[in-house]
Image (tube, helix red, strand yellow):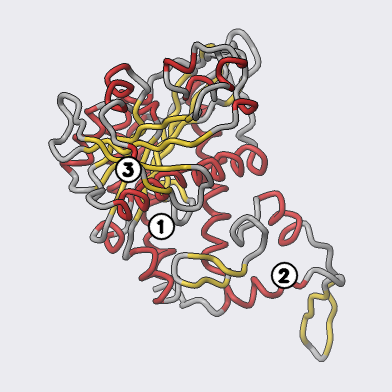
Amino acid sequence: MRRVTPAQWRAVESGLAAVTGRMLDLLPAERAAALAGGPVTIDLDTTDVEVYGRKKRGVAYNHQGQRVGRPHVAAWAETETVLAADLGDGTDDPRATAPDLLRRALAALPPRARAGRVAMRADAGYFAGQLARTAHEARISFAIGAKRIAPLWRLLAGIAEDAWHDAIEMDGAQVAVAEYCPDWWPADTRLLIRRVQLDPAQVSADPRSRRRRTLHPDQRALPIPELAQQPAVYAYSFILTNLDVSSPARAAAAEHWYRHRTTVENLFRDSKLGAALRHLPSGYPQVNLAWMWGALLAATMAAWLHQLTAMALGEDIVHGHGVRGGKAMIATLRWRLIAVPGRLIRHARHLVLRLPPGHGLLAEVLARLRDLPTPA
């Protein structure tokens, strides 16, 4: 593994792109059309993977004081599958490599999916004009979280109260749109703002707490007793996007779509709890890169198994193998599909596999896989 070159690791992404296209071809026509017709969403995100050992290379201390490697992943959100990935250390800024990662992710999409509506979303760790320009040049939509900087707080004073409209499926939340385009960002960039009303009891007295940092600076500095006397306490989030937010309904829909970028966290969780990405075992970055790809490929295989064998309606899985949107984690699939005891018997000159009671899912999945079209 230590002799594998970066160009050879790019071949893993090329092979994964071929598999992604093949899996899309195997899906029922209605399901494939729903996925490829869009919107096709590419999520960019990182996760820290702790390592043990002071002499390991390619790792660094993160802000929590842990020695970590940092997988940087581009995922197809609707299928929860990996398109492209890099492995950095705990101090790598994802903004530096995000444009290249996005280009590779777009290249990995099947042609049918790339030809439809494609959009990219990322959190405030990617707040940089270079990524937005890359998305603009690729003719795709983007929504990138913005850091809570002083110019954005000043913009709030110019937003009228009647410009706020209720968010979708989020109690106490409202959205508004402001004219704001940072230097070197695409000219059609707009600022989407979400505010969520809080009970002062929900706010920690610790100024370092995550929720307190979302308050307006004038309220953030107040002690809890004075904060409780405020007419209203709001937590704010800012999103820069080139999506159509010209009406309140479209702005609310854009914010609702952006809020669901956390689907990539399901992929990380599955890779860690079900496929051994909880740590990076080697002192050599090349070996750890192979380890990372092994875990990400396992999570991708599990995701395609769900897509191929679950009951779907449009883009949504309505009946699958678990409770997380019809999807089960790798550990559950391993228990229900692989670690299944059975007895092989001969009956009427045929071999018959008999499963114990309560393990009917294996037979159901095998039957659905047999019904798939034969590979060309």
Mark pair 2, 3: CA separation: 53 Å
Q: Is residue 192 above or below residue 107?
A: above
Say if mark 3 contacts mark 1, CB within 8 Å.
Answer: no
Left or right? Give the position of 107 relative to 218.
Answer: left
Residue 245 visible in the displayed image: yes
**Farthest residue toward the top?**
54
- The percent coordinates of residue 189 (x first, y second) are 20, 37
- Type of amino acid at the residue the image marks with label 3: Asp
Tell me if 339 is positioned left or right of 111 in this view. right
Tell me which residue sits at (27%, 26%) in the image. Answer: 155
Q: What residue would you read off at disc 3?
A: 162
**Could you tell which of marks 3 and 1 lies nearer the N-terminus?**
1
Q: For residue 104, say whether it is visible.
A: no
Q: Position of residue 212 (x, y in %)?
A: 53, 20
- Three-letter amino acid code of the residue under disc 2: Leu
Task: Give the alpha-carbon distance from disc 1 to disc 2, as whole Å.
Answer: 25 Å
Give the secondary structure at mark 2: helix
Residue at x 72%, y 58% (from the top left corner):
338
Secondary structure beneath disc 1? Answer: helix
Q: CA distance from mark 3 to mark 1?
A: 46 Å
Answer yes or no: do the residues labelled 2 and 3 have beta carbons within 8 Å? no
**Camera-side residue: 303 or 23?**
303
Instruction: Tell me residue 256's x, y (percent).
Output: 42, 49
Residue 274 relative to residue 302: left or right: right
List the residue tagged with mark 1.
20
